[in-house]
Image (cartoon, rainbow, N blue to C red):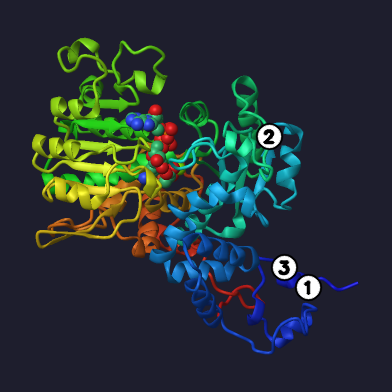
Amino acid sequence: MPVTPTALQDRIHNRGTAYTLEERARLGITGRLPAAVETLDEQANRAYAQLEGQPDDLHRYIYLNEIHDRNEVLYFKLLADHLDELLPVVYDPTVGEAIEQWSTDYRDSRAVYLSIDRPGDVRASFESLGLGPGDVDLIVVSDAQEILGIGDWGVNGTDISIGKLAVYTAAAGIDPTRAIAVNLDVGTDNEHLLNSPLYLGNRHARVTGERYDAFIDLYLRTASELFPDALLHFEDFGPSNARRILVDNADTYRIFNDDMQGTGAIVMASVFSALKVTGGRWADQRLVVFGAGTAGTGMADQIHAAMVRDGATPEQATGNVWLVDVHGLVTDDMPDLPDYQQVYARAKAETAGWADGEIDLLTTIRQVKPTILIGTSTAHGAFTEDVVRALADGVERPILLPLSNPTSRIEVMPADAVAWSDGRALIATGIPADPVEHEGVSYEIGEANNALLYPGLGLGAIVAGARHVTDTMLLAAAEAVAGQVDVSRPGASLLPPVSDLRASSATVAVAVARAAEEDGVATTSHGNLVQAVHDAMWVPVYPTSDGKEER
Ligand SMILES: NC(=O)C1=CN([C@@H]2O[C@H](COP(=O)(O)OP(=O)(O)OC[C@H]3O[C@@H](n4cnc5c(N)ncnc54)[C@H](O)[C@@H]3O)[C@@H](O)[C@H]2O)C=CC1
Ligand SMILES: CC(=O)C(=O)O
Ligand SMILES: [Mg+2]
């Protein structure tokens, strides 16, 4: 029987051609590698050249995944050295394409799969990892009901948890050996998947109601019992579940909803920067959110809170928010409004004479003259030329945030938004975008994607051992992101560049950990937070045999 070269299969410790001859002998893999003993840099150079040879981003994604499953240090070394270029490959927007193909392309996966049909297996599934109570900092979980803007992808959505974790490590140095990706398989309503012979998930419709709630409860209880220090990150749940899970459990568990809280905070950061340009106050903003689901209403809540902090009464702040969804402006006469929309529903009487039937986005903009327009609708092209021109007619420097992902869902492409607003709109988008040249000015488009914020937020929460993610921590993260940009130059980005993400995340983490201490939710105290954050950041290098020094 052939001997299995286990040292080469252990993705956490494997260093492939970088093993010395002595190490190869000690590990029983003599003769299983070519003669050369390489450095990590040499390995990374070869892998990067091979990566460049791939025909498109989806193949780059698959290639990188193979490295991820073979040699974690090499994978993160590549990401660290080329973060700007590779973030769109391992994460948004390519991860959306990969998810659509996931069951077909399936090879192997590092995630934990929890099936609603086998609740008795939840504990054993976590225990199979062999990790103790102090071994886990972070768990990212998704039930994949609303993946990015592409909808329900069942077990295929596993890669959103894996992608989010990859960003945590690449951007903020979260130790990948102390993080777990989880898919909650509660079924899928995606007919295409249910009918596909290759689909790998539970072949039934999504389970809802009490059984769903009991499963979430079981997940939360088991994960936090087994790994009491872990931050429980929720990603891409459906709108009513996302909000309910967060609201019902935020006081009991260490949980964080990225689509609501992370996105809300990156939007806050974008608006902080934009207000430096406009000179406006929070309390005076008029906000229109187009696409009032998980992310859109999460943002509305955070901007509402900012208005109140700036002196508005809660009623005045609510009066400054308009939601537009599939049936137009959300008004209080609409039947069956979900609770998260009811809060901001406008009195029907107030809109008398605006339109005969549904009040569309264009009409709303003409009437309201918003200072901020956010798109979280998944409706590609919904911010038409008329919409953008009406926005720019209403105020001198409108803040325009078309945030839907992936690119096929964005409400307006940045080049159009710049042109149609004659360069006056202050723009950030949910996807990476090249600068736009317009009448001699180069407009840098900030990436208002929660990926610019949640890694640092998570790191800060972990370093502080925060029992909860509080509003103060979210605000501190937003201010720390905005504090890193200089908006004085015409066309300057509202957000820091992705190339600086690691430094930016460290700054965010320090601010977040400090806020956790101030809020009394920190369980660990540090003399020097900057040093503590720095020390906590994992770096992709091969440790020497004593595990301390690096080479
Ligand atoms: N930039 C970022 O960091 C983030 C971006 N997003 C993006 O926001 C979008 C929405 O995500 P979620 O809020 O999680 O989804 P969701 O499903 O909770 O919300 C989408 C909302 O848009 C509405 N909608 C759909 N079509 C519409 C149309 N034609 N006109 C008006 N409203 C319409 C839906 O009824 C729903 O209320 C996605 O594209 C997602 O990628 C979400 C989270 C973070
Ligand atoms: C970025 C993100 O979390 C989303 O689009 O869902
Ligand atoms: Mg998301």
Residue extending farthest bottom = 35
Res 121 quadrant in image: top right
Do we see residue 533 in this rendering? no
Which one is in front, 173 or 94? 94
Residue 9 shows which numbered tag? Answer: 3
Residue at 60% over, 25% down: 213
Q: Residue at x 21, y 49 (%)?
A: 416
SS of the residue at dot 2?
Answer: loop
Q: Where in the figure is residue 487, as x and y percent of width and height?
A: 17, 55
User: Which quarter of the image is occupied by the N terminus?
Assistant: bottom right
- Mark pair 2, 1: CA separation: 37 Å
Q: Quadrant of residue 475?
A: top left
| Residue that badge 2 annotates | 203
Which mark is nearer the camera, 2 or 3? 2
For this rendering, which residue is in front, 143 or 418? 418
Under mark 1, the amino acid is Pro
Ligand 1: which quarter? top left
Separation of marks 2 and 3 at Cα, in angstroms: 32 Å
Residue at (59% x, 45% y) in the render: 156
Furthest-right residue in this view:
1
Q: Are marks 1 and 3 in contact (CB under 8 Å)?
A: yes
Disc 2 or 3, which lies upstream in sequence?
Answer: 3
